[in-house]
């Protein structure tokens, strides 16, 4: 079963996803897949907060880009918690040259859609909770790089949501089922 949890920044989506993953696991091991890298003090504090909430027996994989590789050869059939897709998209964006984005930003959006499709394919037959940030409720950014990010993440979110068994929106700590 694939479950997508979306919401705004600090909406409670990660906490809800952790609870959802525990229920889905039903005693199976849980592997937390972190896409963020703690490069500054503020990000380190966020990582520490997430770590303090997680059970100590959960596995951890830190992978900023190659998520598909995390799910290929897993023999134990754990429940995966991927936190989060928005950071994953941002990591890909930061790998792009400004010239490449200038020439055709639609190409990056297509690349991310393909990556999302590969991700969903790699999760077939597995239990996973995927966390993402909702970009569809905000305005269009005046910053070009932010617009490229918004467009790509919106495409990734729609691609994953179409294939997910369940989709949840968390706002102000309150989860609401959108699908499944």
Image: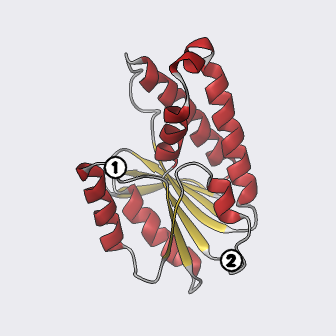
Locate residue 51 relative to residue 97 in the image: left or right: left
Q: Which residue is mark 1?
A: 39
Question: Of all residues shown, which one is farthest toward the bottom?
Answer: 27
- Disc 2, SS: loop
- SS class of the residue under badge 1? loop
Q: Which mark is residue 77?
A: 2
Residue name at image x 56 percent, y 87 percent: 27
Q: Earlier in the sequence, mark 1 or mark 2?
A: 1
Indicate the position of residue 40 as horizontal and vertical percent values: 28, 48
x and y percent of residue 14 in the render?
40, 59
Q: Nearer the viewer, mark 1 or mark 2?
A: 1
Report whether 69 appears left or right of 20.
right
- The crowd level at tag 1 (other Cα within 10 Å; few <14, some 14-19, many 20+) is few
Query: In which quadrant of the rendered image does the C terminus lie?
Result: bottom right
> Marks 1 and 2, Cα distance to the nearest angstrom?
31 Å
Do the residues bearing badges 1 and 2 touch, measured as CB atoms within 8 Å? no
Closer to us: 47 or 7: 47
Q: Position of residue 5 (x, y in %)?
A: 50, 54
Q: Is residue 158 above or below residue 41?
A: above
Is 104 situated left or right of 173 in this image?
right
């Amino acid at each position: 079963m694939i479950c997508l949890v979306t919401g705004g920044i600090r909406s409670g989506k990660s906490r809800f996803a952790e609870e959802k993953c525990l229920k889905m696991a039903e005693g199976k091991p849980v592997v937390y897949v972190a896409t963020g890298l703690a490069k500054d003090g503020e990000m380190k504090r966020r990582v520490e907060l997430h770590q303090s909430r997680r059970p100590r027996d959960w596995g951890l994989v830190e992978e900023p880009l190659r998520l598909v590789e995390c799910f290929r050869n897993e023999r134990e059939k754990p429940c995966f918690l991927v936190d989060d897709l928005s950071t994953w998209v941002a990591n890909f964006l930061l790998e792009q040259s400004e010239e490449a984005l200038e020439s055709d930003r639609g190409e990056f959006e297509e690349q991310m859609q393909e990556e999302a499709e590969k991700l969903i394919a790699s999760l077939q037959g597995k239990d996973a909770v995927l966390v993402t940030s909702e970009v569809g409720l905000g305005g269009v950014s005046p910053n070009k790089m932010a617009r490229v990010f918004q467009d790509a993440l919106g495409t990734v979110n729609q691609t994953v949501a179409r294939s997910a068994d369940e989709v949840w929106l968390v706002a102000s700590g309150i989860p609401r089922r959108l699908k499944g």
